[in-house]
Every structure is written in structure tokens, then in C-alpha cells.
Image (cartoon, rainbow, N blue to C red):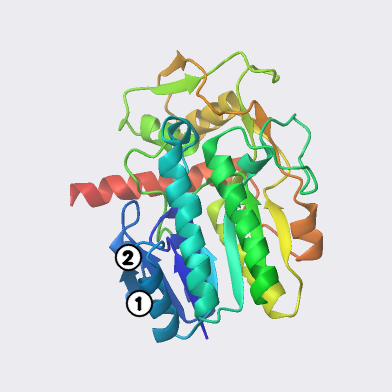
Amino acid sequence: MTVLVSGGAGYIGGHMVLNLHDRGEPTVVLDNLSTGFRWATPPDVPLVVADAGEFETALNAIRTHKVRSIIHFAARIVVPESVSDPLGYYLANTVKTRALIAAAVAGGVQEFIFSSTAAVYGETSLEPVHEDRPPAPVSPYGASKYMSEMMLRDAAAAHGFKYAILRYFNVAGADPKGRYGQSTPMATHLIKVAAQAALGQRTFLEMFGQDYPTPDGTCVRDYIHVSDLAEAHAVALGHLRGGGGNIVVNAGYGRGYSVRQVIEAVREISGVDFEVRQGPRRPGDPPAIVANADTLRRQLGWTPRLDDLGVIVRHALDWERELVRRAAN
């Protein structure tokens, strides 16, 4: 039986496809290629170019490829953009997820894994946040994801399929084998932006806010390597297939780094002292958010392999160099 990966030509979904492909799992990708890339999908993996919110197309893909499990990544993810375009985010992240869940129900899908976010928690302290903390999103992005969590929970109760929800923190890095990485030119991820500045693709890096209630005044985040995150989804799928119950888990490492610390790591590893400019706070950015990921580690047996900021930065830099090489050829 096949795994359908929505958004499987994008950054995180693409790494999930590599993980499944490496395992020999039959996989099909559903992606509208708005931020994903056709070349990111292995040649022997079917790619359905369509929106995850297209019910009939999704249902046809489920039936044609005999899909048993769905891992749903397709979404819009920029917090400040969600503040300026809330309806666009509720459409992309909530309405279209509802359509994909409906297709899953109609197609008899047995397991549904949902890509959620730490943004559902809203304002938190430097202390790691546990899954039992009541959600209180402060951005339309976080709210759109939490609404989807509730829909998934209710649909599973009504229709009898199983689900896993992974609330993950700041995703970074690239495939250690150099096959894929964050490839959207104007992505807003800090480590990618810093890597681009180090390689001269940006003239400077803008630091948003220096007066947060954190040790150095900049936002603190828990950075998780994208390949470890893909493995967390694979572990969650194995849990459901093995008879485990529905689960909501944080995906992070349990330690936070400030924006200044990340910038210094990129400077040190790249050997480039790129320019950093001070900018205002961005709407919707909480001061700090760090994962308590004990549930993922203990209950699901997840063991990260790439839990090191230096490794994450090095892989991100390697991928940016690869993108420069490709652009030159």
C-alpha cells in the first residue's frame, strides 16, 4: 500500500519523500509546484501536479495508487504574511486540509499524519513547552493549523481512521547526501537567509527585533534538522501501523538558540563576516519557543541523528553552494 505525500515536492515534504524512497516505501506525491520543484521528486515516484485542496483529484490519486496513508505537508508557512493575509492562510491551511481529509475518508485511508506547528502554542517562555499546554495561537498561521488539528481529530473519531499530529519547531538544514534542501529563492528561514548572505547572494541580513525578553534580546527558537524531522514522521507512521493510538507530539530538540547565536554560527562555519542590519519586530513572532519532545523520544522511540546546530548550518551552506553551482551551469 502506498503513502501519499502532499506538498512532497517542497522543502520538508521533499525530505519525507526521500526518507520513504530510501526505505523502499511505495510513494506518490501530490503538489501544485507553487513552492515545490518537479526535479525534487525521484524519477520513479509518481507526481500528481495538483492542489491538495482539489477533492476529486486527491481522491482519484488515492484510489489509483491504492493509498493507505497520507502525510500532509502542503501549506503556507510565513507568520508575518499570515497576519497581512489571514484569509489566504485559512484557505490554504484549513479549507484545503478539510478537502484532503474528506478525500481520505472517501478513499478509505487508514492513517493520516498532519504537519502542524509550534505556532499553535502562541506566547511561551524560554522553558520547553509540552504538548499538554493549551493551544493559544497569536497568528493566523498558528490558528489555521490548530483548526486543522481539530478537524482531523473530529473526522478520525467519526470515520475510524488513525492520525498523528506533529507540532514542529524551526526546521533547517538539508539532506546529508546533498540531494535536496530549501530551494525557494526568497524563503524567510533564518539559517537559509544567513547562508545566502554568507555566500554573497544577499547584500545583508536583517535582524527583526532586538528588545525581546530573552538573554540577548533576540528571538529564541528550537532548530530541528529537516532529515530528523522526516524520520520523526516515519516513526509516527510506524506507530500508527503497529496498532498505536492517535497522538499529538512536539518535534524539536529541546534546546533553543537566539537569532544572534545562529548568525554567529553561520559566520563561524562559513568564514564570512556578512553584514547584519537591525530591523523592527515582525508581527506574530513570539519571543521564544522551545520544544519538550519527550513524548516523541520516549513513546515513539525517535532518536535524532543530527542534533547539532553546527551540522545543521553546514548542511544548509553546502546546499546553498549546490544551488549556486546549478545556477551557473
Picture coordinates of residue 152 (x, y %)?
62, 62
Instruction: Please give left or right for residue 47 compared with residue 144 in the image.
Output: left
Secondary structure beneath disc 1? Answer: loop
Picture coordinates of residue 220 (x, y %)?
64, 29
Q: Is residue 31 visible?
A: yes
| Residue count near mark 1 (Cα–Cα under 10 Å), binned few <14, some 14–19, many ≥20 | some
Relative to the observer, which residue lies in front, 79 or 321?
A: 79
| Residue count near mark 2 (Cα–Cα under 10 Å), binned few <14, some 14–19, many ≥20 | some
Q: Is residue 175 visible?
A: no
Examine the rendered structure and indicate whether residue 190 appears above or below residue 251.
above
Q: Which residue is mark 1?
A: 46
Quadrant assignment, res 129: top right
Relative to the observer, which residue lies in front, 295 or 181?
A: 295
Residue at the spot x=64%, y=17% of the render?
212
Q: Which residue is mark 2?
A: 50
Quadrant assignment, res 43: bottom left
Examine the rendered structure and indicate whether residue 66 appears above or below residue 245.
below
Residue at the spot x=75%, y=79% of the render?
243
Q: Amino acid at mark 2?
A: Ala
